Image (spheres, rainbow, N blue to C red):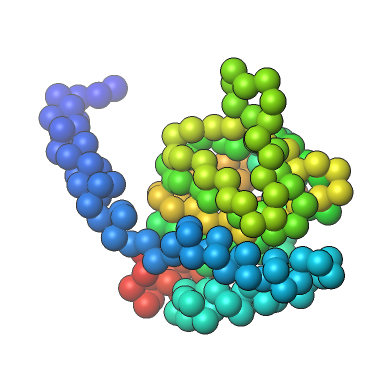
Amino acid sequence: MLTLRTLSLLPFLYALYYLLDTHWLPHQYVFSPAKLQELSKQSIALHGASNNTEAMMEDLVARLQKEYPRYVQDLKWDEWMFNNAGSAMGAMVILHASITEYLILFGTPLGTSGHSGVHAADDYFTILTGSELRFLPGEVHPTVFLPGDQNHLPRGRSIQYMMPEGGCWALELAQGWIPAMLPFGLVELLTSTMDAETAWKTTWFTARHMGAQMLQGKF
């Protein structure tokens, strides 16, 4: 039950959140969605025709590390993990995770579709291979994103998305309150797939990356 004392704190808590959200949060971002798209297009131009997705990813991560040397981790192929969220399934590997941003490679060679979720973060999804389809209520045709295109999902909004059969791989950036996104990425692992190993990997790798960033002052 809410007490008068608790209610009296609500204006203060709202003001604190407003200040953090509008003034502190944007100043914590280090990644530029436009720069990520530019670097992705360079890797696509170099490796897209050969259909060598692994080489494209390695090349892209090297470009990202050159642009953001303190913030992008090595591409570790043994740290790929499943991701089940919004009824969609794919795999991801973390390149950066902090309180205010994450950067991952995400996709599947099989195809999938689902609900994006509603998040307290902006999401920028840059296609590397394959295609992604986006649908909003009221539309009768999907929007199609091809290699080099970037699908921006504003925070607080939701979409249905699909990676068609044949697969799709993308570079995904989220900017906002990242811890608030974690339940969306874990709930199906704990209530549906019962994939305890993936739940542990998701939690451990995310915490490890966030801790490393906090130690160098990146929140």
Query: 177 or 123: nearer the eye?
Result: 123
Q: Position of residue 76 (x, y in %)?
A: 69, 75
* Quadrant of the image containing the C terminus: bottom left
Residue 212 placement (x, y as % from top left):
46, 74
Left or right: residue 94 compared with residue 27: right
Viewer-nearest residue: 187 or 49: 49
Identity of the residue drawn at 63% across and 64% down = 41
Q: Quadrant of residue 42?
A: bottom right
- Residue at the outermost top position: 138
Q: Residue at x 22, y 52 (%)?
A: 23
Compared to 139, does 204 lie above or below? below
**Residue drawn at (70%, 69%) of the image:** 45
Total tally of numbered discs in the picture: 0
Question: Picture quarter containing residue 191?
Answer: top right
The answer to whether 52 appears left or right of 169 in the picture is right
Is 180 located above or below residue 143 in the figure?
Answer: below
Q: Name the residue rendered at 55%, 74% in the picture.
A: 64
Quadrant in the picture for the N terminus: top left
In the rendering, at what x and y percent does residue 201 appear? 66, 61
